Image (cartoon, rainbow, N blue to C red):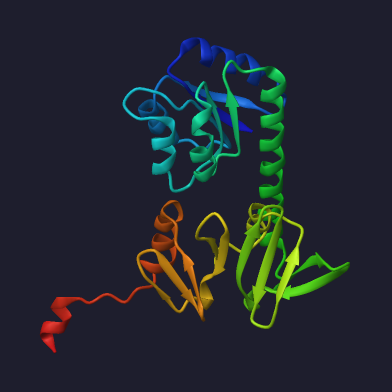
């Protein structure tokens, strides 16, 4: 996994480098003292994993993550544990408190590798398989569900409830895991607790999505992606020049 480190402390960067070099599946391709230099690097290079500090000059690590529409897998490494919740809301996969203990570092990168491998597997399966359905385990049965019948999915810690046009089904899998295995062309996360099938959206306001009788909140950290990929690309706009010729 190609990774970079962003931290304004030289000793912290060196310590992270030493830890990364101990892990066979990690390759350090960049180490930066500030977000600006790192961002310039990311504009022309792809990475799989980002280690980033929070408290840095000019722009904090969390502020920078909030600007990224497509985030790499991210692990926060910081001396400030009070930012953990905000970090997880921005989609970070783990949070290491300084001074970093190697066993804690190893646990975080192993988790990153598991997610990375799952994403790679899912991407391969989506390309290779043309099935219009999937299976979930519920009530001791494997239940077949068609993608185009799923309206939305609600997350409940280690479970999800899948709402289809005919029923709702609970299964023991978390929301992030099932999201990785759904076709990205139709399914999108709209807040911490919901994934929707955009084909069932009836209307969208600034912070609310209407699907049938249900009103679902469109959260700020997911709003930009939703509007960019599903609203702006499909909206019919008025062109005044053409109107004036009628």
Q: Residue 101: horizontal and vertical position, in percent?
A: 66, 17
> Would you place residue 88 above or below residue 57 in this image?
below
Q: Residue 56: horizontal and vertical position, in percent?
A: 39, 23
Left or right: 159 in relation to 36: right
> Would you place residue 100 above or below residue 220 in this image?
above
Residue 186 visible in the shown view: no
Left or right: 174 in relation to 232: right
Q: As rendered, which of 50 and 79 lies closer to the eye?
A: 79
- At a point 44% along the width and 67% down the height, the residue shown is 230
Q: Residue 44: horizontal and vertical position, in percent?
A: 43, 36
Q: How many marks?
A: 0
Classify residue 231 by image quadrant.
Answer: bottom left
Residue at the extreme bottom of the image, as rendered: 246
> Would you place residue 41 above or below residue 72 in this image?
above
- At a point 73% along the width and 56% down the height, the residue shown is 173
The C terminus sits in image quarter: bottom left
- At a point 71% along the width and 43% down the height, the residue shown is 117
The N terminus sits in image quarter: top right
Q: As rendered, which of 118 and 200 lies closer to the eye?
A: 200
Residue at the extreme front of the image, as rendered: 82
Q: Residue 41: horizontal and vertical position, in percent?
A: 42, 31
Q: As rendered, which of 134 and 126 lies closer to the eye?
A: 134
- At a point 65% along the width and 73% down the height, the residue shown is 163
Classify residue 102 by image quadrant.
Answer: top right
Residue at the extreme right of the image, as rendered: 140
Left or right: 185 in relation to 125: left
Residue 114 visible in the shown view: yes
Residue at the extreme top of the image, as rendered: 11
């Amino acid at each position: 996994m190609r990774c970079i480190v962003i931290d304004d402390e030289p000793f912290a960067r060196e310590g992270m480098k030493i830890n990364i070099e101990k892990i066979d599946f990690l390759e350090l391709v960049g180490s930066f003292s500030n977000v600006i230099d790192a961002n310039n690097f990311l504009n022309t290079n792809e990475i799989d994993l980002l280690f980033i500090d929070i408290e840095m000059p000019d722009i904090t690590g969390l502020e920078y993550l909030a600007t990224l529409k497509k985030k790499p897998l991210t692990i926060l490494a910081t001396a400030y544990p009070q930012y953990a919740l905000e970090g997880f809301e921005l989609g970070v996969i783990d949070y290491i408190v300084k001074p970093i203990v190697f066993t804690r570092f190893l646990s975080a990168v192993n988790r990153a590798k598991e997610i990375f491998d799952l994403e790679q597997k899912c991407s391969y399966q989506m390309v290779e398989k043309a099935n219009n359905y999937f299976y979930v385990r519920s009530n001791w049965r494997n239940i077949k569900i068609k993608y185009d019948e799923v309206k939305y999915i609600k997350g409940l810690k280690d479970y999800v409830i899948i709402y289809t046009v005919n029923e709702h089904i609970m299964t023991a899998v978390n929301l992030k895991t099932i999201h990785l295995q759904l076709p990205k062309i139709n399914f999108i996360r709209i807040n911490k607790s919901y994934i929707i099938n955009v084909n069932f959206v009836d209307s969208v306001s600034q912070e609310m999505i209407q699907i049938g009788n249900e009103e679902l909140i469109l959260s700020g950290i997911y709003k930009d992606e939703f509007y960019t990929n599903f609203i702006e690309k499909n909206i019919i706009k008025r062109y005044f020049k053409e109107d004036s010729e009628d």
